[in-house]
Every structure is written in structure tokens, then in C-alpha cells.
């Protein structure tokens, strides 16, 4: 749960720390705006992927399901700067499938918290394995990190790619390659 008053006080201190006048017209409402924004962008802190992955439907065939190009925005826990990109999620059902929007919602649960990309990728895969009980899961996340493009090494356009495989995807190169082909189409 976001504590608006603590955030507002912290923002005031930060602005003073960089030499700003917190009473300047353009900044007077900034602490409150940021507190409201944090409630939105860190809303995943109070969510559980189980809520989204528990509504399943029976299927006769267990063919790979891929949802690709799920746009997300997250915040690097090291610098509190944004990273954003696309997640691609696949699973092999075990007699049950989940609604497609629930896969995107699961990505959002983990993206909307201070995070590192590698951990987020694994969390999505682990949640799907735990709550869907599929034969296997593969998740690929491609993201641009503002801590790499706006500061530090300053390399705009560079992307970080992280992959997590679980179950039948772990050792099966054929399944992995089929996933990559489907994502690149």
C-alpha cells in the first residue's frame, strides 16, 4: 500500500536536495502528483498473479499457446529509472488454458513494482507454472533501460533480453526454437 504522505515528504526533500524551491509555482503540486503516480506505477506490489491465473478453461489438445508483444513499463530497483519493452509468453497446457488477457495481466503484476528484468522474467514463468500447472513455460522479455540510455554509458536503443524456461521448455530445443520462430513472425 502506497503511503502518500511519506512519498510527498520524500519528493519535497529530493527537490530541495537538488537545489529546487519546493514552493515554486510549477513544483507546488509535484509531490502530490508523484504520490498518485506511484500508486499507479507500483500497483503490482499489492497484486498476486494467482488472481489472474486462476480462471482456467478445459481443452482437449495441449498445443503451445504464445502471447507475444505484451508491452510493459517497469522501474529498475537499482536507479528507480524506467525500463520498458515487450514480454513474450508461451506455455504448453496440461488440459487447461487461461484467458489471454490474464497472461498480459500477469506480466503487469510483476512489471508494476521496483524490479530487475531478470527477476521479473523468472517471476512470470514461476507464477504460470504454479497457478496454471502447465507442462512447460517460456518467457522472453526485451527491454530498454533508461539507466543505460539516459545516464551512465548512454547507449540509447540498446536492449536487454532475458529468458526463463520451465518444465518441458527447459531441455527441449525444438520447443524453444518454435517459440522463437513464433515470436519473430
Image: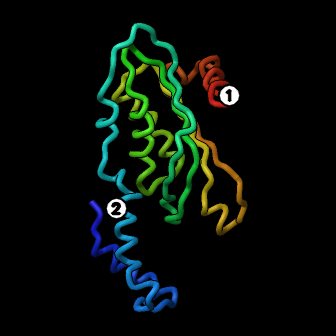
Q: CA distance from mark 2 to mark 1?
A: 36 Å
Position of residue 78 in the picture relative to residue 39 (left or right): right
Q: In the rendered view of the protein, which quadrant contains the C terminus? A: top right
Q: Residues within 10 Å of mark 2 (few under 14, many from 20)?
A: some
Q: How is the image coloured?
A: rainbow
Residue linked to disc 1:
185
Q: Up-down: is 21 above or below 105?
A: below
Residue linked to disc 2:
39
**Which residue is pictured at 58% across the width and 21% down the height?**
171
Q: Up-down: is 84 above or below 51?
A: below
Q: Earlier in the sequence, mark 2 or mark 1?
A: 2
Q: Up-down: is 59 above or below 129?
A: above
Q: In the rendered view of the protein, which quadrant contains the N terminus? A: bottom left
Residue 167, horizontal then vertical, whole percent? 48, 22
Q: Are marks 2 and 1 in contact (CB under 8 Å)?
A: no
Residue 135, horizontal then vertical, whole percent? 44, 18
| Dot 2: element | helix
Q: Up-down: is 140 above or below 173?
A: below
Residue 153, horizontal then vertical, whole percent? 71, 65
| Dot 1: element | loop
Front residue of 125/105: it is: 105
Position of residue 59 in the picture relative to residue 78 (left or right): left
Position of residue 156 in the picture relative to residue 21 (left or right): right
**Which residue is pictured at 39% across the width and 45% down the height?**
109
Using the image, tell me which numbered label, if any, was put on residue 14. none
Q: Residues within 10 Å of mark 1 (few under 14, many from 20)?
A: few
Amino acid at each position: 500500500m502506497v503511503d502518500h504522505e511519506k512519498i510527498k515528504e520524500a519528493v519535497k526533500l529530493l527537490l530541495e536536495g537538488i537545489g529546487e524551491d519546493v514552493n515554486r509555482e510549477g513544483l507546488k503540486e509535484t509531490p502530490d502528483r508523484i504520490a498518485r503516480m506511484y500508486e499507479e506505477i507500483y500497483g503490482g506490489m499489492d497484486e498476486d498473479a494467482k488472481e489472474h491465473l486462476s480462471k482456467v478453461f478445459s481443452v482437449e489438445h495441449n498445443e503451445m499457446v504464445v502471447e507475444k508483444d505484451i508491452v510493459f513499463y517497469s522501474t529498475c530497483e537499482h536507479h528507480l529509472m524506467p525500463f520498458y519493452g515487450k514480454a513474450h509468453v508461451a506455455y504448453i497446457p496440461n488440459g487447461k488454458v487461461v484467458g489471454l488477457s490474464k497472461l498480459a495481466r500477469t506480466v503487469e503484476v510483476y512489471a508494476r513494482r521496483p524490479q530487475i528484468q531478470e527477476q521479473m522474467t523468472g517471476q512470470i514463468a514461476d507464477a504460470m507454472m504454479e497457478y496454471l500447472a502447465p507442462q512447460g513455460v517460456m518467457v522472453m522479455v526485451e527491454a530498454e533501460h533508461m539507466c543505460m540510455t539516459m545516464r551512465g554509458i548512454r547507449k540509447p536503443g540498446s536492449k536487454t533480453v532475458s529468458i526463463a524456461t520451465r518444465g518441458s521448455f527447459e531441455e527441449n530445443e525444438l520447443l524453444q526454437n518454435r517459440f522463437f520462430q513464433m515470436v519473430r513472425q
